[in-house]
Image (cartoon, helix red, strand yellow):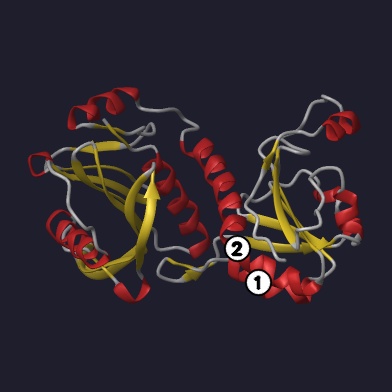
Amino acid sequence: MMRKTVIIILAFLLLILSSFGCTYKPDAVGMAREVVIFTDHKELVEDELSFALKNTIYTPQPGDEFFLRYKKINELEANLIRHSLLFVGLEQDSIINFMKGMYPELNSHDSFSLYAIRDLWAKGQSVIVFVARDSQYMVEGLGSVRANLRKEFKIKLLERMEGVTYAEGVDRKLSTEIEKYGFKLRIPDGWILDERYADDNFVWVHNFYPNRLVFIYWEETERENLSREEILALRDSLTTKFYEGDSLYLPLTIAGPYYFRGYEAIRIDGVWQNDSLEVNGRKITGGGPMISFAFNAKGRFWMIDGMLFLPETPRKKIFWLNQLEVILANFQPL
C-alpha cells in the first residue's frame, strides 16, 4: 500500500558521526537557487521535478525559481558541498546505496519516502533523498511529495537570503521606532522609513538600486471571511492611492490561502503595473514582481507587501524578490 510521507528533518546519525567525525565543515558553495540532482532515471523524473522545483515566477518575464542541474554519480565528489543536493532513485540504485545509513530504509509498508538531512557535508547545506520501490511508485511518489520537496529547498534558500539581506546589519533605531505602530519589523541598514501616510494606517520602507518597497497597512478591527477577490481589490485601492496609481496585472497574478506566522492568510504572488510613470520627463509603462500577505492578528487586519522595480533579467529580479520575502517574514504584530 502506498504511503505518503512528510519530510523528516534528520539530525546527524551515529553512522555519519563515526564516518566523518566531528571535523570542520566548510560553508556550502554554489548558486543559492541551484539544485544538483543525482539520479539514474532522469528521463522518468525530469518532468515531475521541473514541475515541483522550477516554479515559474513572472517578473513580468517568466523565470525559474530553482535551476536544476543533473549530475552523474562520478561527479558527486566535485559537488559534495553544494547548497542543495537531491538524490532520487530506487532502493537498489548505486546512488541510493551510497546514501544508505544516512536515512531510515523503507519498511514493508512504504512504497516511497522523502528525507531531508541538514548540513551533511557543509554548513548551510540541504540534502534530500527520495527513494521508491519501483519506477511506478517513483513517479507517483514524487507527485505526492511535490510540495514538501519544494518547501525544504525554499526554506534553505530564504535562510541564505536572510544572511545576505542583513549582512550589513539591522537599523536598530528604525526597527525600534516603527514599533509605535503596533508591529515589529527588522529593517536592514540603508533602508528608509516613509511615514507621510501614517494617519491612514499606511507606512512603508524602501531602498534604491534596485527600487524595493515594503508597505504595512492595518485596520483597527479584524475583517471577517477574507476572500481572494476582496484582498486583490484592497491592494489595488491602496497602491492606487499611495503608489501613484499602481495596480495588479491579474493575468500574471495568483492569490490563495496561506499560513503566515501561524495566522490564516491570503497570499498574493504576481506582477504590478503602472502606465503613468515618468523618467526624465517622459511617460513610461513600468512593472515588476510583488508578494503580499493579508491576515487578521492581535485584533487587527494587516496587509504587508513587497514590490520591486528592476528593468533587468528575471534571474536578478527573483533574487531581489526573495529578499523582499525575507523582510516580510520578519514582520510580527505586537
Other residues around mark 2 within 10 Å, as few (<14) / some (14–19) / many (≥20): some
* Three-letter code, disc 1: Glu
Between residue 287 and residue 3, name the one nearer to us: 3
The CA span between labels 1 and 2 is: 8 Å
Residue 117's place in the image compared with 225, above or below, is above
Q: Residue furthest left?
A: 199
The percent position of residue 44, horizontal first and vertical second, equals 76, 75
Q: Which residue is mark 2?
A: 146
Q: Quickly name the residue at label 1.
A: 48
* Vertical position of residue 62 compared to residue 191: above or below: below
Q: Quadrant of residue 42?
A: bottom right
Q: Residue at x 40, y 42 (%)?
A: 329
Which quadrant, please, contains the N terminus?
bottom right
215 horizontally vs 38: left or right: left
Q: Secondary structure at mark 2?
A: helix
Q: Is residue 299 visible?
A: yes
Q: Position of residue 105 (x, y in %)?
A: 82, 50
Give the mark, 1 or 2, whose residue is nearer the N terminus: 1
| Residue 244 x, y percent position in the rendering | 16, 59
Say if mark 1 contacts mark 2, CB within 8 Å: yes
The residue located at (86%, 62%) in the rendering is 72
Image coordinates for residue 89, horizontal then vertical, percent? 81, 63
